[in-house]
């Protein structure tokens, strides 16, 4: 009784192996490009979220201590940051600095002159745009002091 049958055709031909390798290489190339763009989009979204938390913390600081906090943006090709400065009180000025967590993400623009007024919990409206070559997100401060972020292409992101 025979358990194995020997066939004249065992294994794959060289052409079949080369076709499979070519298809695998093409799919890997397409997948890595998509993965890189996805990573860039996620980095910008995480940076916008981080800036939102920073601004909310400053809004609470302004409200709690009845201070006015203004923002001084630093837009440069190499480095971008947001410097927050409180109004002088008893000769003391407090400062806070926010930088994007990754060097690929930059502060692209500041629209308006956003600031928080602590006495009534209000704000001077404005927005910060952060992004890279793939996408752009906007962090918006409303007149009531609400801070939110949205993707730059969204309809309600004005």
Image (cartoon, rainbow, N blue to C red):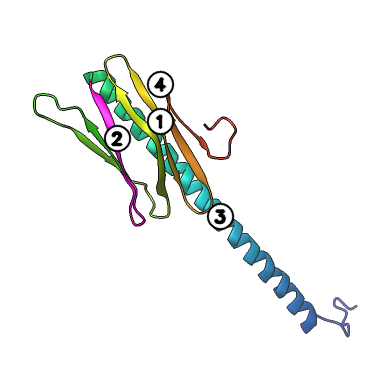
Could you tell which of marks 4 and 1 lies nearer the N-terminus? 1
Residue lying at 40% horizontally and 34% vertically, measured from the top left: 52
Q: Which residue is mark 4?
A: 143
Residue lying at 71% horizontally and 74% vertically, measured from the top left: 22
Could you tell which of marks 2 and 3 lies nearer the N-terminus? 3
Label 4 neighbourhood size at 10 Å, few (<14), some (14-19), many (20+)? some
Q: Which residue is mark 2?
A: 71
Label 4–label 2 contact, CB within 8 A? no
Q: In x, y percent, where is residue 139?
A: 44, 35
Label 2–label 3 contact, CB within 8 A? no
For residue 37, the mark is 3
Label 4–label 1 contact, CB within 8 A? no
Give the CA separation, mark 2 to mark 3.
31 Å
Could you tell which of marks 4 and 2 lies nearer the N-terminus? 2
Q: In x, y percent, where is residue 31?
A: 63, 60
Q: In front of the other: label 1 or label 3?
A: 1
Q: In screen coordinates, is 126 left or right of 157?
A: left
Q: In screen coordinates, is 37 left or right of 140?
A: right
Examine the rendering and report whether any part of residue 12 can be seen.
no
Q: In x, y percent, where is residue 63?
A: 28, 19
For residue 126, the mark is 1
């Amino acid at each position: 009784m025979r358990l194995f049958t020997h066939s004249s055709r065992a294994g794959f031909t060289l052409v079949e192996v080369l076709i499979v390798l070519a298809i695998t290489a093409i799919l890997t190339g397409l997948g890595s490009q998509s993965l890189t763009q996805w990573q860039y989009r996620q980095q910008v979204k995480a940076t916008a979220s981080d800036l939102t938390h920073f601004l909310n913390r400053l809004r609470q600081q302004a409200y709690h201590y009845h201070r006015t906090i203004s923002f001084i943006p630093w837009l440069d090709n190499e480095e971008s940051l947001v410097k927050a400065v409180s109004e002088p009180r008893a000769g003391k000025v407090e400062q806070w600095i926010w930088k994007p967590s990754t060097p690929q993400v930059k502060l692209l623009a500041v629209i308006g002159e956003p600031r928080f007024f602590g006495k009534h919990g209000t704000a001077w409206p404005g927005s910060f745009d952060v992004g890279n070559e793939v996408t752009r997100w906007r962090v918006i401060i409303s007149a009531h002091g609400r801070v939110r972020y949205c993707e730059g292409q969204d309809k309600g992101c004005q």
